[in-house]
Image (spheres, rainbow, N blue to C red):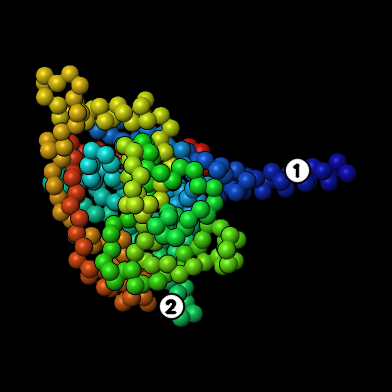
């Protein structure tokens, strides 16, 4: 009997060790994971902790964690600063040329996958009998028809909100139907776990932003809020103060950030960020998304002249 008990204990321990070796197993995941984003600005690091919400956006949270664990965000930058929003997650800043370089999301993620990293898939393109994962995220926000799936608590643009972003698409993208895996598994209505949704609103890749104010508009409902800062005043505000100090006039006692001094306008063509690039897995459906790629969409960014680097994104609680 004792040998039998010891054998059971050994098997259980081996299972735990094995699970730990390949990553965090389901029993150890939290409803509110935490990450620390380390921003580097003007020679100083700023560690900002965020609490994520699986209740509000479980698929977005897992996607963000997958990218963070793979080191995808490390070394990227805040490519757009508007005074109320810090946009990041898709560009590098070249210190020598002082220019932005777009990160080829689809190619990089596929290479990371080949190197052993895993990315949970929630959006697919059905091509006859073949199903192709698109490596984008199911849009967990009211504007995508998600409604009240799950226990939504933080899905508002409050101060310090962490939001998954995607760039606006051409009209052709709205006519491309993809399959999104619903959060409720279909329990709350027709029992269907997947639904046809437009690619345009289910095409988020790696872009995210931190909101610096409060807002409740129709535009806000187009994006998934999936977390919030834990200590905005103590951790994020010092970074904002440093930006303000850099741009303020000498005689200012309580300086505000002068965007005209701190940023320069840069217009970028959105070549690879939000559509399948020419990588192996998309070869059989490339023509479907060709109109999106050739949509000619551009965006004008307010790029900080003193770069804000996303040094690392580390998951501290799963």
Coordinates of residue 296 in the picture (x, y in percent): 19, 66
Coordinates of residue 180 in the picture (x, y in percent): 47, 64
Secondary element at tag 1: helix
Coordinates of residue 132 in the picture (x, y in percent): 44, 71
Above or below for 228 versus 291: above
Confirm whether residue 165 shows in the render: no
Q: Which mark is residue 153?
A: none
Of the 4 image quadrants, the one containing the N terminus is: top right
Q: Residue at x 36, y 75 (%)?
A: 285
- In the drawing, does residue 18 fall left or right of residue 39? right
Sequence-earlier tag: 2 or 1:
1
Q: Residue at x 40, y 65 (%)?
A: 134
Q: Residue 236 appears in which quarter of the rendering?
A: top left
Q: Circle 2 is placed at which residue position?
A: 127
Q: Residue at x 43, y 32 (%)?
A: 230
- In the drawing, does residue 270 fall left or right of residue 19? left
Q: Circle 1 is placed at which residue position?
A: 9
Above or below for 70 versus 187: above
């Amino acid at each position: 009997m004792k040998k039998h008990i010891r054998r059971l204990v050994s098997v259980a321990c081996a299972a735990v060790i094995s699970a730990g070796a390949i990553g965090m197993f389901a029993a150890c995941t939290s409803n509110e994971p935490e990450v620390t984003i380390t921003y580097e600005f003007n020679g100083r690091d700023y560690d900002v902790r965020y609490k994520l919400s699986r209740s509000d956006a479980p698929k977005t949270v897992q996607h963000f964690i997958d990218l963070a664990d793979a080191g995808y965000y490390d070394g990227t930058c805040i490519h757009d600063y508007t005074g109320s929003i810090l946009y990041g997650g898709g560009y590098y800043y070249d210190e020598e040329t002082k220019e932005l370089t777009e990160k080829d999301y689809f190619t990089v993620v596929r290479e990371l996958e080949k190197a052993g990293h895993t990315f949970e898939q929630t959006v697919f393109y059905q091509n006859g009998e073949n199903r192709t994962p698109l490596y984008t995220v199911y849009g967990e926000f009211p504007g995508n028809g998600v409604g009240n799936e799950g226990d939504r608590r933080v899905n508002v643009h409050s101060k310090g909100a962490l939001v998954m972003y995607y760039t606006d698409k051409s009209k052709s993208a709205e006519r491309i139907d993809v399959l999104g895996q619903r959060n409720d598994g279909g329990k709350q209505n027709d029992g269907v776990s997947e639904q046809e949704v437009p690619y345009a609103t289910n095409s988020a890749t790696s872009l995210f932003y931190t909101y610096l104010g409060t807002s409740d508009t129709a535009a806000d409902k187009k994006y998934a809020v999936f977390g919030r800062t834990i200590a905005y005043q103590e951790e994020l505000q010092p970074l904002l103060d440093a930006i303000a100090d850099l741009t303020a006039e000498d005689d200012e006692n309580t300086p505000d950030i002068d965007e005209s001094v701190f940023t320069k306008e840069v217009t970028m063509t959105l070549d690879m960020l939000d559509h399948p690039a020419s990588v192996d897995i998309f070869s059989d459906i490339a023509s479907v998304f060709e109109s999106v790629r050739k949509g000619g969409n551009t965006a004008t960014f307010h790029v900080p002249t003193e770069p804000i680097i996303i040094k690392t994104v580390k998951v501290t609680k799963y």
